[in-house]
Amino acid sequence: MEFTNSWGNQFRAESYSKLEFPNTYYLAYRDLPMIISKHITGKKAIDFGCGTGRSSRFLKQFGFEVTGIDIAQDMLNIAKKLDEKGNYQLVSNGKYSHLGMEQHDLIQSIFTFDNIPGWENRTQILVSLRDLLNPSGKIICLDSSSEMYKNEWVSFTTKSFTENWHAKTNDIVKTIMLDVDDRRPVEDIYWTEQDYHKLFDLAGLEIEETYKPLGLESEPYNWISEKETAPWIIFVLKKKVKK
């Protein structure tokens, strides 16, 4: 099957732009301030796959100098309207050297690799991002866990897509988002945690720490699977030490 980026059209982009941090999405962002504080020194950041700028605006709240990059012009047009003083740039896959080699403290990637198919494609992109990091720089890569596509969540339903249960790395999987007006199925690329480890190794990166955020009883959400199963997985990555 051929993968189509679900966010590559104006209607989808506008629908997504209204989404902030509700429900299951709250767990994606909840722990990021702590993770950033623990692992990142410096304030020069790239937001890879910034979309409509939600994740870039999030970083700016913490004093980062952020360049948001994306391959979808419709998304970037909205990002610029919502954040007129922001720096948002259209890029091509794997071609980022103009942003400044070895100059960045943080590269943030939130949900972006959910929409990137292919081992070679992913590896090339990660290598290109790695080369933008300064010696102490880190990549924070947040994507859907493999369990996302096999459970029900406050923000997503997957029960109509039984084929998800048989998915293997690089297969197309589907969800329906419940927090936006657009209820058409969203296509993602399935990737196991084990194969993420292999991917990072191929790209010359090593994992500094992994986080799997769970919902808490004390939080004001009607969690479904979120308290027992993490919908997201967060990798903190650094350049592999050359021996």
Image (spheres, rainbow, N blue to C red):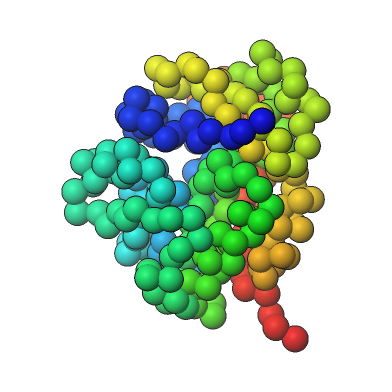
Among all residues in the image, which is located at the extreme left?
A: 84
Residue 72 falls in image quadrant: top left
User: Which residue sits furthest front?
Assistant: 2
Residue 234 image position (x, y, % from top left)? 62, 50
Quarter residue 165 falls in: top right
Could one spot residue 167 in this view of the protein?
yes
Task: Report the residue at 66% width, 48% height from top.
Answer: 118
The percent position of residue 84, horizontal first and vertical second, equals: 19, 48
Position in image of residue 109 (x %, y %): 51, 52
Image height of 61 relative to 183, above or below: below
- List the single residue furthest toward the top: 160
63 relative position to 203: left or right: left
Q: Is residue 122 above or below residue 15?
A: below
Quarter of the image for residue 60 reads bottom left
Please tell me which residue is depicted at 64% across the width and 59% down the height of the picture: 123
Which residue does the image show at 58% across and 45% down from the upper left? 116
Residue 230 visible to an observer of this rendering: no
- In depth, the one of 113 and 19 nearer the eye is 113
In the image, 131 versus 62, the foreground residue is 131
Which quarter of the rendering shows the C terminus?
A: bottom right
Q: Is residue 117 left or right of residue 14?
A: right
Q: Quadrant of the N terminus?
A: top right
List x then y, in percent, for residue 197: 74, 57
- What is the total number of numbered labels drawn onto the structure image? 0
Residue that appears at 32% across and 38% down: 74
